[in-house]
Amino acid sequence: MSRRPSTFMLGGRTYSPAASLLLALPFLAMIVLAFLLPLGMLLHESLFVPSFNLANYEKVFDQAVYLRVMGRTLRISAFVTIITLLLAYPLAALMARTRGLLLAILLLAVLLPLWTSVLVRTYAWLVLLQRNGVLNDILFGLHIISAPTQFLRTEGAVVLAMSHVLLPFMVLPLYAALRAIPNDYVRAAQVLGAGSLSVFRHVVLPLSLPGTSSGCLMVFLLAIGFFVTPALIGGPQQMMLATLVQQQVTELLNWPFAGALVGVLLLFVLILVIAFNRVVRLDRFVGQV
Amino acid sequence: MLERTRTPVSGRHDCHVSIRNLHKAYGDVVAVKDVTIEVKPGEFLALLGPSGSGKTTLLMAVAGFDFPDSGRIEIGGQDVTWMPPHKRDLGMVFQRYTLFPHMSVLDNIAFPLRMRKVGRAAREERARAALATVQLEGYGDRTPAQLSGGQQQRVALARAIVYNPKVLLMDEPLSALDKKLREEMQVEIKHLQRELGISVIFVTHDQTEALTMADRIAVLNFGELQQVGAPKELYEHPASAFVAGFIGETNFWRARAKADATAGDETEVELDGGDTARVLATQAFRRDQAVQVAIRPEHVKLAPNASGMTAAIDDAIYAGSITTLLVKTKGPTLRVRLSTPDEAAATTPGGTLSLTWEARHARAYAVS
Amino acid sequence: MRRTRPAASTLAVSAVAYAVTVFLLLPTILIVPMSFGPDQYLRFPPAGFTLHWYAVYFTDADWIGATLFSVKIAVLTAIAATLIGTLISVALVRGRLPLKRLFELLVVGPVIVPNIALAIAMFLVFDRLRLTGTTLGFVAAHTALAMPFVVFTILASLYRFDSDLERAALSCGANPLQAFLLVTLPQISPGIISAALFAFIISFDEPVISFFISNLDNRSLPRKMFEDIDYNISPTLAAVATMLTALTLLALVLGHLLKRRSNHP
Ligand SMILES: Nc1ncnc2c1ncn2[C@@H]1O[C@H](COP(=O)(O)OP(=O)(O)OP(=O)(O)O)[C@@H](O)[C@H]1O
Ligand SMILES: [Mg+2]
């Protein structure tokens, strides 16, 4: 043996580049077939059919209908992000302080909705919010309303249901960030005479900022492309970007325009991910219990 | 490539490891710099050096887990530089306990035999014998988690020798054990090595461990081989100021050569603080060259009739048969070792002393 | 932990936190008793107890057909995703993979790109490749979607795994493949099984892509639910929702036990 080995062998702690590529090959094939090729063809559809043009993209920004849909999408996504942040912070703070059984229960309360089908959770909101639903019954029983009220198909209902569905995505990164703050820091600040509010402002808040921003990024990303909940709760009245895309494809078969809408959506996503310069930390969503 | 020996033949430990001009860099860090070491058949060689000196890198190259940038490694006369680790037929014990958690102790020890396609019955018999060698009969059915750290490391040792490998490599195998257990294991490993007549390369950063166990010690610093030699040789004739300081206790005193000298000469230097002393030149000096004088605490003597250098006693550390004094000279504070009670009787902190030494014990090294 | 009485602000935060927990769980939990109600429309509290809606589900060929199709897809997805995911994870952690950064991006790609974008893109391509409504189409789509979660789960257990064990196996004479199969794989298997579990749930619950790539012959369970929710909110859906929630709970508990096992071997 006098040659440096080049194939399936261990050198150091590693498989050789050739062996590694071989291991990555099935993944590559799968990702090309089910990810790169479809997205590429869709974008091709929007830009090069019949020949290179930007007409579809111009249409997105020219017509008031579409601008309104985009405005609504961004507005609802922003509301949902803010609401989930406000709801998630106290829960994450409590989780970061607890141990043992209570923590297990709280984690389960976050993970069960996360892993329960979006359809199930959206369906629950439909049942609660419909004209003869639970919410109407309660409000009627309390004499707050005198006749059944239509909550569905309102922007408020969409924001409420989406906030509920996306809340776990905010809680988990926040919890991870708050948990990572050593208790000593907080104690040190207290010893130095800081009240609980200023401990929060000057110690906890800055240190939890990475978790906050990755939670916000995750929720906003999911919200602007969200399909199921807006489609079922909001209906055509509260059309968001994803529902508009669906309508273009299933009802109008307008692939080039749908492709342009997806192109715009991807552009938003890209800008956000680059601006936050943060890879989504998936490890927080798997196996946390 | 030679066919791997399937069934080991006992008593074929007539092979040696030869590391020639080995060089390995990680980016800008040169981990091993042009190192040449020969390990003789049946020899116990310790690789000694401070943290980051390249010991592990060197061992990994011998084991085949890392390939060198240049240089050559031979085992039993065969070039193995680029041979993958599983074909080298080496035994290896790691710093952490690397027993396979999902296998019983016996299955762990039998694993190398299984890889060599030894039959089930022979496998079990030899694994039991190896278990007995490390004094753990009856522990075969346990899982590694049910053993203490010391026991786990013994099993790892049994697993590394069960197939009579040519060479046994160990990377700080005892550093996770407490002091008492570590000292016991040092003796045990040494005995085992003698009994099997196997060649061992043993990495450690503990000089006492190296001195007690090794036939020869190779001292590394910043990837460079400083000296290879028997413990006594290293202690008595350290080739560099680094070795003098790293092995055993040494006082250093800066000085200036008063005359030209060649290696091995006894010559005069002017010590920091103004005194003149006779020292042994370990290499050639020119007049006025800056040197460093290394002298062991036990070689500093009390001069009769105040004929030597005067020094004030700062502190006396009593340790039974010996007493160590910290004395303030015109230069550095020196450690002086006296045997209790004869010599130390006259000394009290605050008093003064007159010191001297034999020129051959004061080794002068050029300051680079 | 502090022994002193918690400050008022801490109590207030906890109170809000518990309220949020209730908010998280309540809508799904309310469905459970309602699914046992006898009325044609859902009421809370239910006016009685019946298993009628469960019987309707189990005797309806449409529901059962969609469920079986989804189970098939989910099992195949779990197998494909863990196989592919294990290989790429090993390449990422133990290999000198060229363009490693690019591969990492491709791994997370399917979660960063909104599902709707992926869904209609697949709709477009699968239509041309005649993959709509086929098992292959569904499995390919769901495997891509599950890949990030699978890879992250397996990566985590590979990082926890002491690579010296692999080296010990090699020094014992095992070749790289033997070292992986006999030492690494048994050690990371709890991670691989929980990755398979995640892949199963992701596929089984996946509504968006299924919505677009189903056809009249082959519909997944989420697609069938989507249609029913949109057109008639029958109490059968409440029964299905209850069973799905129970299934998720089961999977989470199972995953938890697996993780405990991999932490304390
Ligand atoms: N894989 C690597 N990548 C980059 N640098 C490395 C790598 N391995 C070792 N080094 C560097 O090479 C030098 C020698 O490292 P090595 O591990 O051989 O030292 P060592 O003598 O075994 O130290 P220790 O006693 O701490 O184990 C160090 O500076 C180290 O930082
Ligand atoms: Mg080392």
Image: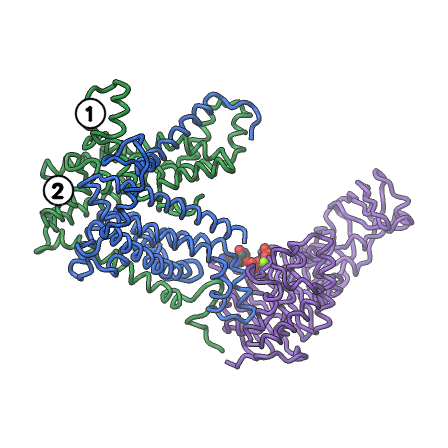
Q: Residue furthest top?
A: A143
Please tell me if label 2 and label 1 are on a single chain. yes
Chain B representation colour:
purple
- Marks 2, 1: nearer the viewer: 1
Disc 2 marks which residue? Answer: A60
Residue neighbourhood size for the residue with mark 1, other residues' Cα within 10 Å, grouped as few (<14), some (14–19), many (≥20):
some
Residue C79 percent location from the top left of the image: 36, 60
The image quadrant where one finds ligand 1 is bottom right
10 Å crowding of disc 2: few (<14), some (14-19), many (20+): some
Q: Chain of mark 2?
A: A
Q: Secondary structure at mark 1?
A: loop
Residue tagged by mark 1? A148
| Horizontal side, residue A232 vs residue B96: left or right | left
Task: Give the residue type at disc 1.
Answer: Pro
Chain letter corresponding to the colour blue: C
In this picture, residue C32 sits left or right of residue C12? left
Q: Which residue is more in the foreground, A8 or B26? A: A8
